[in-house]
Image: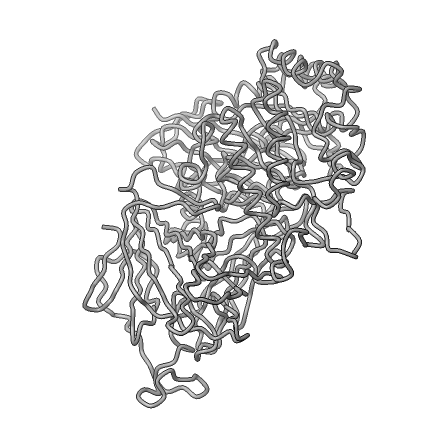
């Protein structure tokens, strides 16, 4: 069983593949955290809770026990105001204006399988035998507030998911001020804090530093999970590396404003909590209503970051992503954005597609500029009808011309945005996020549609669906190119205005669910100025994400390496673009650009008609090679070998499940004069097998490659070099 309950001690023991999570109801109903870590067969209180009278730690039982205080008790879903002075997981304002609540254990139930969350993305099971779910009901006997904290343990994975559902069972309305999804109280602070930070075109750089006393946190207040911070944090033991040591990781399945934090208290305990950002958030909960918090995925590893990543990858590939394309190889595409920007017509698109077909490319994607009067980025968002000046015979004609070449046709949208210069805005200026009497700030010449409104969502579903039904479209790039300002909604009451950002996300999820379900044959790729919404919430609806608007191969080493800490390769769009690169103006070889892009879902984003004959041959070889190995790359196990954050070299490998085949990629950024001979070690192979290097026919043992390593060719000359090895077991 994944969940055991000891009735006598009121003890819960959750067991995954190689992890245990233990908690207990103590005193008059306080739900206390006891252990999370490597799996133990049984729990016998070897780390039993200890209490003592500590000055300035208040006592719920002052007349009988001055040693007991919530200020020192490790808890599962803590509140504030009844002797715990640390950051709470929730905060509720009652009708009388006070914010004191006191949740106690009421009852629990253990269920087979896992239920979905109403209106929110979440991981799932395909068989009820995969997982068990524990629902613990906590109640406040004064205010009649009920919180159901839910834990799902995947029995063959080192994964536990958490969420909370807050219910108002009283007769008066209440206001949620804070509603985080999960809280874990560790009983020490000997950790490093790791997160993924960055900026537009510089997403998900790895940031690791020692945990310190006080609060350390990451967050987004932008209305999206953001380029700046990803909704992921991990606590690592000091000795943890890529392959060794304990890692405790947390990822929020949500695409909007979030908070993830670790607080080290006066006694060196560490409280980790995360969920919807309480900044500028509140939620009116009328009598009988409930609020569902998003899901948190918690991963434990005692074999370092690499094992943590592979756990996330397997879970997200198979139990978060959905639909026809979850397990399908992703097509090799060419996108016209950096080839033409807004300056194209049907003939130019057909020219690029014709060359693409000659090179073996399988999908053409028409990017921005095909609709309204969209000759620049100042107009027409919201006017989802074809620009007859560019495509006089419509999308259907263009798509069919491309499909006659035996290529698929894809399309770019930015459905969540609206241009001031658009027919839609002139008809419905009230449809954008705005606050009365304040100016409407623009970003990238656009405003944000108010998806907290059902009428806007319904209109959006119809507009996008009409376009998708008008032509044989098999791929959609769904973009979102600005963050929220003036976050207000015309249809919400004064007391509900701070609900707008979350209601927007609920509306967006409804729109995405409806459209992707209505067009199951279309592969949807999410995008937000590249990687500004690369999060598990998006992957639930769209199984891949445009990793970054930065297509420079050297920049992508860090971006793709950092992204791989949490998100699977099958989710990463990666394109070969022109040189000098349009973002950093760097020249790199077509070979290296191809090798970096082949480490994700390969695509091209340049004018193929301008390639030389030699360049076309290189692209043709890249496409052919990727077609042979993409199943391995997109769905194999990733092993990170050399980090671009730690030196001049990067290396990673992809290994299939039975360890009979591997692809090993090595990249060197800058050349060094009179450099030493070097090698690197290959991980993830079967040490008992012998492998043939396809490119050289050399034979090596799996143990030899892992413990001795593979020599880096001395003939590599100049900056920006790459080498790829394909290994096949004999």
How far from the left and from the top, in percent, is residue 490? 68, 51
Residue 246 occupies which quadrant of the picture?
bottom left
Q: Which residue is rendered at x = 53% and y = 59% of the image?
A: 260
Q: Which residue lies furthest to the left in this view?
A: 8
Q: Say if 693 sits above or below 554 in the image.
A: above
In the rendered view, tell whether residue 64 sits above or below residue 318: below
In the rendered image, is residue 299 in sight? yes
At x 35%, y 40%, the residue is 125
Q: In this view, does 192 lie above or below 610?
A: below
**Rendered location of residue 518, percent (x, y):** 51, 28
Q: Quadrant of the C terminus?
A: top left
Q: Which of 212 and 128 is in front in this view?
A: 128
Of residues 224 and 554, which is closer to you in this image? Answer: 224
Rendering coords of residue 588 (x, y %): 69, 32
Q: Nearer the viewer, residue 497 or 4?
A: 497
Residue 558 seen in render: no
Res 377 → quadrant: top right
From the viewer's perspective, tell me whether residue 680 is left or right of residue 623: left
Q: Which of the two residues, 378 or 311, is positioned nearer the viewer here?
A: 378
Labels in figure, total: 0
Judged from this view, the residue extending furthest toward the bottom is 63
Relative side of 338 to 41, left or right: right
Residue at 54%, 42% (x, y): give it: 509
Locate residue 464 relative to residue 307 in the image: left or right. Answer: right
| Residue occupying the far front of the picture | 171
Q: Is residue 532 above or below residue 145?
A: above
- Where residue 133 appears, as percent x and y from the top left, is 31, 51
């Amino acid at each position: 069983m994944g969940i055991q309950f000891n009735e006598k001690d009121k003890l819960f023991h959750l067991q995954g593949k190689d992890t245990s999570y233990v908690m207990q109801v103590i005193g008059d109903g306080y739900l206390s955290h006891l252990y999370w870590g490597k799996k133990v067969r049984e729990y016998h209180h070897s780390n039993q809770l200890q209490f003592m009278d500590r000055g300035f730690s208040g006592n719920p039982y002052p007349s009988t026990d001055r040693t007991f205080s919530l200020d020192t008790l490790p808890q599962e879903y803590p509140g504030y105001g009844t002797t715990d002075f640390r950051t709470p997981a929730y905060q509720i304002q009652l009708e009388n204006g006070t914010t004191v609540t006191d949740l106690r254990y009421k009852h629990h139930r253990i269920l087979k399988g896992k239920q979905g969350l109403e209106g929110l993305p979440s991981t799932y099971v395909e068989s009820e035998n995969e997982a068990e779910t524990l629902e613990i009901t906590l109640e406040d006997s004064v205010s009649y507030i009920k919180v159901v904290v839910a834990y799902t343990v995947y029995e063959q994975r080192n994964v536990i998911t958490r969420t909370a559902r807050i219910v108002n069972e009283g007769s008066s309305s209440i206001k949620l001020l804070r509603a985080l999804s999960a809280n874990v109280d560790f009983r020490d602070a000997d950790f490093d804090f790791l997160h993924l930070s960055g900026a537009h075109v510089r997403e998900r750089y790895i940031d690791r530093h020692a945990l310190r006393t006080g609060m350390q946190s990451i967050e987004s207040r932008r209305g999206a999970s953001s380029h700046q911070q990803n909704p992921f944090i991990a606590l690592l033991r000091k000795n943890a590396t890529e392959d060794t040591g304990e890692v405790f990781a947390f990822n929020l399945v949500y695409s909007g404003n979030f908070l993830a934090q670790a607080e080290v208290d006066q006694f060196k305990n560490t409280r980790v909590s995360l969920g919807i950002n309480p900044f500028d958030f509140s939620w009116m909960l009328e009598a009988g209503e409930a609020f569902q918090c998003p899901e948190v995925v918690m991963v434990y590893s005692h074999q370092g970051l690499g094992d943590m990543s592979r756990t996330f990858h397997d879970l997200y590939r198979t139990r978060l992503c959905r639909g026809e394309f979850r397990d399908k190889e992703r097509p090799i595409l060419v996108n016209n954005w950096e080839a033409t920007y807004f300056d194209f017509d049907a003939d130019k698109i057909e020219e690029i597609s014709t060359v693409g077909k000659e090179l073996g490319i399988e999908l053409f994607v028409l990017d921005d500029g095909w609709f309204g009067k969209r000759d620049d980025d100042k107009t027409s968002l919201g006017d989802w009808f074809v620009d007859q000046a560019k495509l006089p015979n419509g999308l259907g004609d263009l798509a069919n011309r491309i499909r006659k070449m035996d290529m698929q046709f894809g399309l770019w949208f930015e459905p969540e945005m609206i241009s001031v210069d658009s027919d839609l805005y002139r008809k419905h200026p009230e449809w954008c996020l705005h606050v009365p009497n304040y100016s409407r700030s623009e970003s990238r010449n656009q405003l944000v549609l108010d998806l907290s409104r059902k009428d806007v969502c319904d209109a959006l579903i119809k507009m996008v669906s009409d376009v998708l039904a008008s032509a044989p479209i098999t791929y959609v790039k769904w973009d979102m190119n600005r963050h929220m300002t003036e976050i207000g909604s015309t249809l919400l009451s004064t007391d509900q205005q701070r609900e707008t950002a979350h209601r927007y996300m609920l509306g967006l999820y409804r729109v995405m669910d409806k459209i992707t379900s209505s067009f199951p044959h279309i592969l949807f790729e999410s995008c937000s100025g590249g990687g500004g919404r690369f999060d598990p919430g998006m992957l639930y609806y769209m199984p891949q994400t445009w990793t970054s608007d930065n297509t420079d191969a050297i920049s992508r080493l860090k971006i793709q390496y950092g992204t791989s800490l949490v998100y699977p390769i099958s989710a990463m769009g990666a394109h070969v673009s022109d040189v000098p690169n349009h973002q950093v103006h760097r020249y790199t070889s077509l070979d290296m650009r191809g090798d970096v892009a082949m480490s994700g879902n390969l695509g091209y984003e340049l004018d193929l008609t301008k390639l030389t004959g030699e360049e076309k041959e290189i692209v043709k070889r890249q496409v052919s090679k990727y077609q042979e190995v993409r199943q391995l790359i997109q769905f194999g196990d990733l092993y990170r070998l050399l980090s671009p954050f730690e030196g001049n070299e990067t290396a990673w490998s992809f290994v299939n499940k039975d360890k009979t085949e591997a692809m090993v990629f090595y990249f060197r950024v800058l050349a060094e004069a009179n450099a030493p001979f070097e090698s690197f070690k290959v991980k993830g192979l079967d040490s008992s097998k012998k492998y043939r290097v396809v490119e050289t026919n050399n034979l090596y043992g799996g143990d030899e490659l892992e413990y001795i390593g593979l020599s880096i060719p001395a003939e590599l000359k100049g900056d920006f070099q790459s080498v790829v090895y394909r290994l096949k077991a004999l």
